[in-house]
Amino acid sequence: MLETLQNSLISYGLNAELADITARFTAIFVIILLSLVGNFIAKNWILRTVSKIINKTQTSWDDALLESQVLNRLAHFAPALILYSLIHIPLTNYDTATLIISNLILIYIIMLGARLIDALLNAVTEIFHTNDVSKQIPIKSFTQILKIIAYFIAIVLIVGIVLDKTPVYLLSGLGALTAVLLLVFKDTILGFVAGVQLMANKMIARGDWIEMPKHGADGDVLDVTLTTVKIQNWDKTITTIPTYQLISESFKNWRGMSDSDGRRIKRALNIDLQSIRFLDDTLLQRLEKIQYITDYLKQKKIDVSQYNKQMNIDSSNKANGRNLTNIGCFRAYVLAYLKNHPMINQEMTLLVRQLAPADNGIPIEIYVFCKDKNWGNYENIQADIFDHLLAVLAEFDLTIFQNPTGHDFRKLTSN
């Protein structure tokens, strides 16, 4: 091609030397013009057309390809490949210049390839995050290790081009640097191994609520990467924990609660021991008016009466035989109240139990599951339940245990 152009110029009267220079510069100009045309067509015609088609589709995976700049970086190959395939024409007989310029273009193409793989892996990550499986299996650590491998291969290829050595020759010399590489990439290697274990055991994923008090972490997992796990605490601060720490240390994951049908309420009311007593007729008549335990009290009265009669119990003293207590009736009321509460899951564990007496009275513990797992709603429902139970205690002549305060001591001194 160059020779044909030179002969044409000579036929128009130019001398051989001037025709050679003119032909070479003309070829360079044409090649640059072709690369610019290729770049224009790739970005303004092909890329825009594909982008319009993607924006009209209903699928989301192609949008990820567009947002991650995969197609944009792919378009950069058009001018680079045109230059690489044609640059030897104007440099005919200039082998050194041809080699240098071709190598520079090839290095540019390799860098484009690495960046394309980077963008493609970002798109894969975004597409994966739209799937429900991403809530159980984090893959960002694996895409990051693939990026490292891609850039490492690109660097080896570039160094091989610069030194005019094959990649195999360069890789054979890395054996002596293995110890150094292990030291430099220690966190990366540990993070990768930890990431494999986390994924295999489904221990953590984006969106999980985890607690790790040692590292000040208590909140939602924002991201699981090759070397770190990023957690947004409830106070909106960000805690970053090395990935391998989640394997070497313990942490609490609340995913089980999120996946279940309820959020646990476990709280106790400490009843003052001195307020506990048997029911007398006055208290019994008052409690029989409480709808939740009306039937319970009627049946209990029959059961107690029959038992005491069969056992010939002297009922003149309540210490003999069986008798109803205010704390027992209160437990029955709490159980009936919770069974009729619309926000308590009746299909999960529902317990009202009496724990061992302690310095702070006798605990009546409530162990149930709230249907609404939203933190704010859950707290409101829990507060409403205990507001009611604390207020209703007086109906059973029971009092909450409370340590003496300054107000109590002032009343003593005033008396």
Image: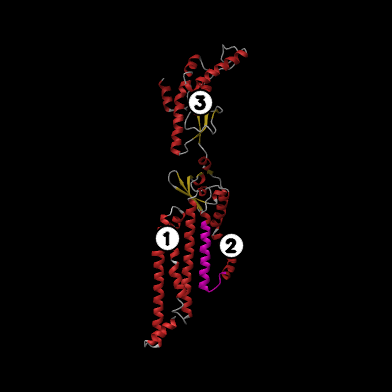
Which is nearer the eye, 1 or 153?
Answer: 1
Q: Nearer the viewer, mark 2 or mark 3?
A: 3
Callout 1: helix, strand or loop? helix
Q: Amino acid at mark 2?
A: Ala
Where residue 268 sits in the image (x, y, percent)? 51, 30
Callout 3: helix, strand or loop? helix
Q: CA distance from mark 3 to mark 1?
A: 64 Å
Residue beneath label 3, please?
A: 336
Where residue 328 sits in the image (x, y, percent)? 53, 22
Tell me which corner region of the image, top left, top right, bottom left or bottom right, holds residue 13: bottom left
Tell me which corner region of the image, top left, top right, bottom left or bottom right, holds residue 383: top left
Q: Residue at x 51, y 72 (%)?
A: 161
Q: CA distance from mark 2 to mark 3?
A: 68 Å
Which is nearer the eye, 225 or 9?
Answer: 9
Which is nearer the eye, 90 or 358?
Answer: 90
The quarter of the picture where the C terminus appears is: top left
Where residue 287 sits in the image (x, y, percent)? 48, 19
Where residue 5 sits in the image (x, y, percent)? 41, 82
N-terminal of the pair, mark 2 or mark 1, is 1
Q: Which residues are magenta?
A: 143-167
Q: Amino acid at mark 1?
A: Val
N-terminal of the pair, mark 2 or mark 3, is 2
Residue beneath label 1, please?
A: 50
The vertical placement of 96 against 306, above or below, is below
